[in-house]
Amino acid sequence: NAGVTQTPKFQVLKTGQSMTLQCAQDMNHEYMSWYRQDPGMGLRLIHYSVGAGITDQGEVPNGYNVSRSTTEDFPLRLLSAAPSQTSVYFCASSRLAGVIEQFFGPGTRLTVL
Amino acid sequence: EDQVTQSPEALRLQEGESSSLNCSYTVSGLRGLFWYRQDPGKGPEFLFTLYSAGEEKEKERLKATLTKKESFLHITAPKPEDSATYLCAGGSYNTDKLIFGTGTRLQVFP
């Protein structure tokens, strides 16, 4: 099993550009989520999904969209990138929704100029 | 407001010098306390889940313990390969989400 995979690993955008961060898992996990990690702050939840076709907002959802058309994939879309979205983004999955251990991908480092 | 605080922010140890990392939490309806290890440029790697006060879990040189207000990650006779950032997170029955601390960056020197 590859676990949780993310692409790209690095990305540089200009303010106002849009892009999609890809996330896939091959563990048949129901729950998937996106976090951002900034210096001096803990991981913060952006959006999450408890199953295909179901998504919800986390702590910091503004400026991001998600969809979940399959169990395996959970892409994160930046609609109009802003410098405040410069961060490292992690996708995570777990077998079920709720408070259980989550498995994280390797991350995408995004810089918005 | 649910909160998780880790201390110290950074810790430098000599190889073999045992120590403890602290995770204080105020999480209403704590359902689980999680420890993760994160290497530079990598995603967090799950280590332990603790569910109730008094519970302990061990893995190699690491032992995690839980009280009603805090959790400790004890590192016994650490080696340089234990160098990493250690994250803790509290999960609440109320929100079904994890609240992460900012981590302790551990460096172990030979």
Image (tube, coloured by chain):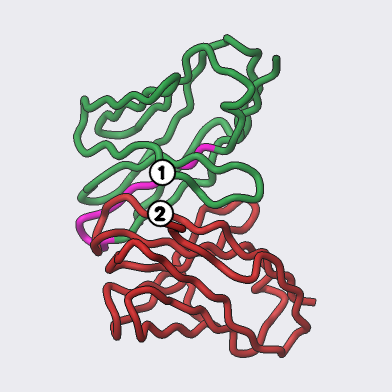
Q: Which numbered dot is residue A92?
A: none
Q: Are marks 2 and 1 in contact (CB under 8 Å)?
A: yes
Chain given the colour red = A
Same chain check for tags 2 and 1: no
In the rendered structure, the residue with mark 1 lies on which chain?
Answer: B
Residue A101 is inside the magenta segment? no
Q: Which residues are magenta?
A: B86-96
Where does the image place residue B88, in percent across and percent down from the top left? Answer: 43, 42
**Taking A98 as reference, is A82 left or right?**
right
Q: The N terminus of chain A lies in which quarter of the figure?
A: bottom left
The amino acid marked with disc number 2 is: Phe
- The front one of A68 and A3 is A3
Secondary structure found at label 1: strand
Q: How many marks?
A: 2
How crowded is the residue under tag 2: few (<14 C-alpha within 10 Å), some, or many (20+)?
A: many
Q: Residue at 25% of width from left, 64% of height from top?
A: A97
Q: Colour of chain B?
A: green
Q: As displayed, is residue B66 above or below residue A78?
A: above
Q: Residue at 60% of width from left, 42% of height from top?
A: B39
Q: Residue at 40% of width from left, 37% of height from top?
A: B47
Q: Which numbered dot is residue A103?
A: 2
In the rendered structure, the residue with mark 2 lies on which chain?
Answer: A
Q: As displayed, is residue A38 above or below residue A59?
A: above
Residue wearing tag 1: B46
Q: The C terminus of chain A lies in which quarter of the figure?
A: bottom right
- The front one of A79 and B41 is B41
Q: Residue at 64% of width from left, 73% of height from top?
A: A85
Marks 2 and 1, Cα distance to the nearest angstrom? 7 Å
The amino acid marked with disc number 1 is: Phe
